[in-house]
């Protein structure tokens, strides 16, 4: 399988499970309609309709595109990591029960893990 070439910063987050600094990501403030895809393999992961401002400093989504995101127990024993179901690239973490939206789910995602395809 062929993957996109990643910058050193993207590789740190996606391959080494790093985290970008809060409020530093280019996709945090985007409000347009479109689809967020995996930066490494282009798999569709989130629709813009599920994006919301959580105040966390990272793009937040209360739902994923069915089958695009896989949940894995984090090594810290507390959090749940989310990865691209297609390539396994690290996206961030998912939190439930915070009541920020009706779905009470927050996929907290690194901007560096995503690409945005604007809807025409």
Image (spheres, rainbow, N blue to C red):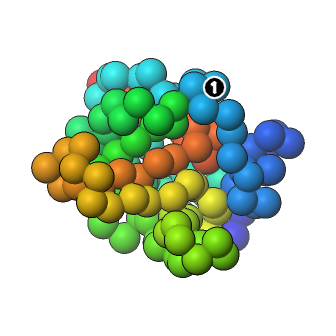
Taking 59 as reference, is 45 above or below it? below
Q: Is residue 76 left or right of residue 8?
A: left
Secondary structure under the numbered disc 1 in the rendered image: loop
Question: Quadrant where the C terminus lies?
Answer: top left
Residue 47 visible in the snapshot: no
Instruction: Give the camera-side residue of 87 and 69.
Output: 69
The residue where tag 1 is placed is: 24
Instruction: Give the camera-side residue of 120 and 9.
Output: 9
The residue depicted at 42 percent of the width and 23 percent of the height is: 30
Relative image position of residue 53 (x, y in whole percent)? 34, 31
The residue depicted at 85 percent of the width and 42 percent of the height is: 8
Relative image position of residue 65 (x, y in whole percent)? 32, 58
Query: So how many labels did they put on this image?
Result: 1
Residue density around tag 1, few if under 14, some if 14–19, many if 20 or more, within 10 Å: some
Taking 75 as reference, is 101 above or below it? above
The residue depicted at 64 percent of the width and 72 percent of the height is: 76
Residue 107 visible in the snapshot: yes
Q: Is residue 54 left or right of residue 77?
A: left
Instruction: Give the camera-side residue of 103 and 43.
Output: 103
Question: Quadrant where the N terminus lies?
Answer: bottom right
Relative image position of residue 3 (x, y in whole percent)? 71, 58
């Amino acid at each position: 399988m062929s993957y996109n070439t990643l910058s050193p910063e993207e590789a740190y987050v996606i391959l080494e499970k790093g985290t970008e600094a809060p409020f530093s990501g280019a996709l945090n403030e985007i409000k347009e309609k479109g689809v967020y895809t995996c930066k490494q393999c282009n798999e569709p992961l989130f629709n813009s309709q599920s994006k919301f401002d959580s105040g966390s400093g990272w793009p937040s989504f209360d739902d994923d595109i069915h089958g695009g995101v896989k949940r894995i127990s984090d090594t810290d024993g507390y959090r749940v990591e989310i990865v691209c179901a297609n390539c396994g690239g690290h996206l961030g973490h998912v939190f439930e029960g915070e009541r920020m939206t009706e779905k009470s789910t927050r996929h907290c995602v690194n901007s560096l893990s995503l690409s945005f395809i604007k809807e025409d």
